[in-house]
Amino acid sequence: MTDWVDALEQEGRGLVEALDAHPDARRLFDGTIDVEGYVHYLVQTYHYVRWSMPLLVSAGERLKRLGRHARLADLLLQKAVEERGHERWLLADLRNLGCSEERVEGTARAPAVDAYTGWNFFTSRAGVPTAFLGTAYVLEYLSVTRASGAVERLLEVDAIPNIHKAVTFLRSHGAADVEHVAELTSVLRTLTDREEQAAVLLSARTTRALYPGFFRER
């Protein structure tokens, strides 16, 4: 593959296109989603984001134990630090929408969330640990292309009571992830092993397929 990172970017674009065609995701992006749909999305997001830091740490430390790709291992551990506390932002946003932490914890996870966490637990702990960077790339690509615009329109439309106090998570994943995607792209270009490239792409593709399931069913 002449530039396998281009194929990775295609997975990011594919996710954006899939979400633009999904009713609730489209409503989130244009600011017209109702409170029930927004709460559903934030709750399911909490259920996967809470595992981001331990998964990144697990993958980074495993790479170090294997003595492979020191720069990628450091990047995974750096991202773990960047992800610290993001689940608390989600809980704060949900609390400002009248959704208690007890309700969040008691809400069933969507099948797509269970599949997402299960897949990433496998790759970080037993599979190819660099694969988690494919997941990270697709999620950060989505943030760069849609998060800031979604915040602007949610506030402009103002259809959800107290929405101005419930966009912390989305706002934090807009402009900040532009730099993250650029850095991740640069580091991934140094990965030359075909098997590991394939593992990263598979994780990106898996995330693209599962993420629409974090929204309410059509």
Image (spheres, rainbow, N blue to C red):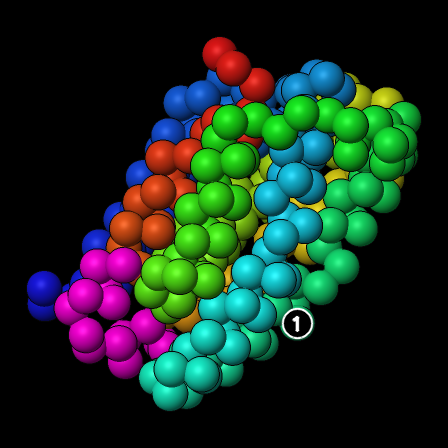
State the predominant SS element of the stretch in magenta: helix
Q: Residue at x 50, y 82 (%)?
A: 74
Query: Between residues 1 and 80, which one lies in front from this camera angle?
Result: 80
| 61 relative to 9 in the view: left or right | right
Query: Between residues 124 and 10, which one lies in front from this camera angle?
Result: 124
* Residue 110, picture quadrant: top right
Can residue 217 be seen in this snapshot?
yes
The range drawn in magenta is: 186-199
* Residue 54, picture quadrant: bottom right
| 57 relative to 156 in the view: left or right | left
Task: Please provide percent x and percent y for residue 99.
Answer: 86, 28
In the rendered image, the vertical position of residue 108 relative to residue 125, given as above or below: above
Determine if the magenta segment contains residue 153: no
Task: Please provide percent x and percent y for residue 166.
Answer: 80, 38
Question: Which residue in the structure is indicated by mark 1?
Answer: 81
| 126 relative to 168 in the view: left or right | left
Number of numbered discs overlaid on the protein picture: 1
Can residue 182 be seen in this snapshot?
no
Determine if the magenta segment contains residue 189: yes
Task: Please provide percent x and percent y for residue 44.
Answer: 64, 33
> Which residue is situated farthest in the left direction here?
1
